[in-house]
Image (tube, rainbow, N blue to C red):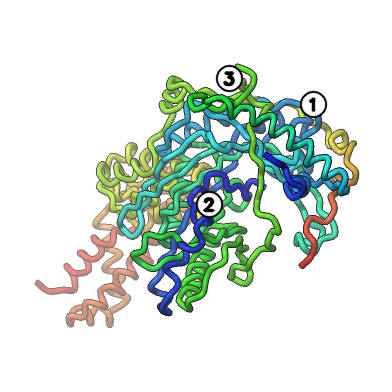
Amino acid sequence: MPERAKVGTAWAAEAAGRPGRAQDGGTGAVACASEFEPVIGLEVHVELSTKSKLFCGCQAAFNAPPNSHTCPVCLGLPGVLPVLNRKAVEFGIKTALALNCEVASFSKFDRKNYFYPDLPKNYQISQYDLPLGTSGHVDVSVDGGMRRVSIKRVHLEEDAGKSVHESGTITGSSFSLEDYNRTGVPLLEIVSEPDLRSPEEAYAYLSMLRSILRYLDVSDCKMEEGSLRCDANISVRPKGSSVLGTPIELKNLNSFRAVEKALAYESRRQAEILARGERITRETRHWDESRQVTVPMRRKEEADDYRYFPEPDLVPLEIEEAWVNEVRSTLPELPGVRHERFIREYGLPAYDAAILTESKDLADYFEAAVAAYGGDAKAVSNWVMGELARLMNATGTDIRDVRVAPAALAAMLKMIDDGTISGKIAKTVFEEMFATGKEPSQVVAEKGLVQIADEGELARIVDEVIAENRDVADEVRAGKDRALGFLVGQVMKKTRGRANPQAVNRLLRERLVPG
Amino acid sequence: MKITIADVDHVAMLARLRFDEDEKAGMAEQLSRIVEYVEKLNELDTGDVSPMAHAVPLRNVLRDDEVRASLDPEEALRNAPDREGDFFRVPRILESE
């Protein structure tokens, strides 16, 4: 299982090697659980979106009929040779660069040996001591501030197959079924240093990582489909201490929320144990989503012993500077930089900039609309984050499938600016554009939504409304400003929203409010 | 370095192999001789020699990201000891607690 990979999480090994010291903070006087802080590191696996697998030409497909994408190489039949997919290496280098890693000039693959039915070769081809990238960092914004999260390593490996257990759970099943379509799909493992100090920071880091990977177009990062998986290491220590506690490994974190909740639960659980003056046992725990607790996983009798050795079937990689530079030239503007630019260039609040730049497609959409509009970028932001986001959520539409072209949104905003439609009517127009993909001018013409520009016509309607609501009009005359709102509403109703509310307000005041 | 029966037990367990006591003793003896032979390397100063990553002096053998035909599931499953539909069927993975 790739998710079991613990390669290079040296900090974990380090902490394991000194269990006595690790517990220093928890011994002695009974302390209060709130005096502890969590220390968290994440190990993330993403499936790279190459067309073919890492070491063979089988298609890397999701949701295909079982065992329809296998061959002698990924089935681990004797006498075959794996050949490395260049694109997967490039995606790895690209990611390493985006995460500010040093890209190895010399890298190789190793065999990680273990027995599990989802691994037909009985070893996983992974990278042990010479990973593609090391020593990187990601800046994550948390609570208005920035936190730099160090990246320990980035390495390539192959995914395992998928097991379906007879009775739904592994322990209750008398047999399991194996589908090897996923076996050999390229995975990138990204290991952070234990730099995260709260479940919220872990969530923010994971979001930023996903955002970066999607900008790079190296993975679709769908946690629900398993193309992004996350394990966490968490220990707690007294606030202010620099000693690492005994780390617990958390598994079965199947959503961003699960990562945050499991870490919050585990942080509390460990702090309470230490506050009682007890010790934490190093173990792997499983997040139980239905009960919202972590439970210990069956303990292995033997410590992991993967007997890594260099993969003799693959020759090493020599990654020359020219290749790295070539890949570097394909890097897009990354979300962090784009976020800063949106604030600077468009004068957007940090909140808007963060939401708009989370997805490259959304940010591209926004920028295209601003360019076509030429007016206030904040107005575009309001529409994208407001109506557009609302309709996308309500209909489950991805930004890439939105039928309103950025230029059409811009055209609609201009119609508001020049008074052709009111801001209120624009919402109706936009809904129609969203549903049909029609141009705003066409929607407005077809539905007769043009704002009443003729002041004389508007004045006639205002007079009608006053005549029909004499009591209310008298109240306004007596100085009840709130009654004015009712009359404005009546005019809007009569005009089916086609009146300019400011003009209506003015016309009513001219007639009812002396002086 | 002397390979003990305990070492043999450990490695045998990792490799899912079972030996009787005579075989274990024979393995310990043979493995000791092999490791002792490799220890000859200690006679050399290898301080300036970087670990060998591969015996063949080739680098960067790569293929383009192109999809090639996979096996028909029927073909893929032909050697399976057991199957269910188009899945490989395997025995119980973990004993129940």
Along the line of sight, the residue nearer the viewer: A499 or A24 = A24
Mark 2 vs mark 3, foreground winner is: 2
Quickly name the residue at label 1: A79
Quarter of the image where one finds residue A503: bottom left
Callout 1: SS: loop
Q: Residue A13 carries which label?
A: 2
Q: Are marks 1 and 2 on the same chain?
A: yes
Residue at image position (48%, 24%) is B48
Name the chain letter of the residue that bears numbered label 2. Answer: A
Quickly name the residue at label 3: B59
Along the line of sight, the residue nearer the viewer: A93 or A404 = A93
Along the line of sight, the residue nearer the viewer: A364 or A324 = A324
Name the chain letter of the residue that bears numbered label 1. Answer: A
Mark 1 vs mark 2, foreground winner is: 2
Marks 3/1: CA–CA distance:
21 Å
Q: Is residue B80 above or below residue A143?
A: above
Q: Are marks 3 and 1 on the same chain?
A: no
Q: How crowded is mark 2: few (under 14 residues within 10 Å), some or many (20 or more)?
A: few
Q: Which of marks 1 and 2 is nearer the N terminus?
A: 2
What's under tag 1, amino acid-wise? Gly
Q: Is residue A74 visible?
A: yes
Name the chain letter of the residue that bears numbered label 3. Answer: B
What's under tag 3, amino acid-wise? Arg
Marks 2/3: CA–CA distance:
32 Å
Left/right of residue A154 with respect to residue B78 in the rendered view: left
Q: How crowded is mark 1: few (under 14 residues within 10 Å), some or many (20 or more)?
A: few
Quick check: marks 2 and 3 in contact, CB under 8 Å? no
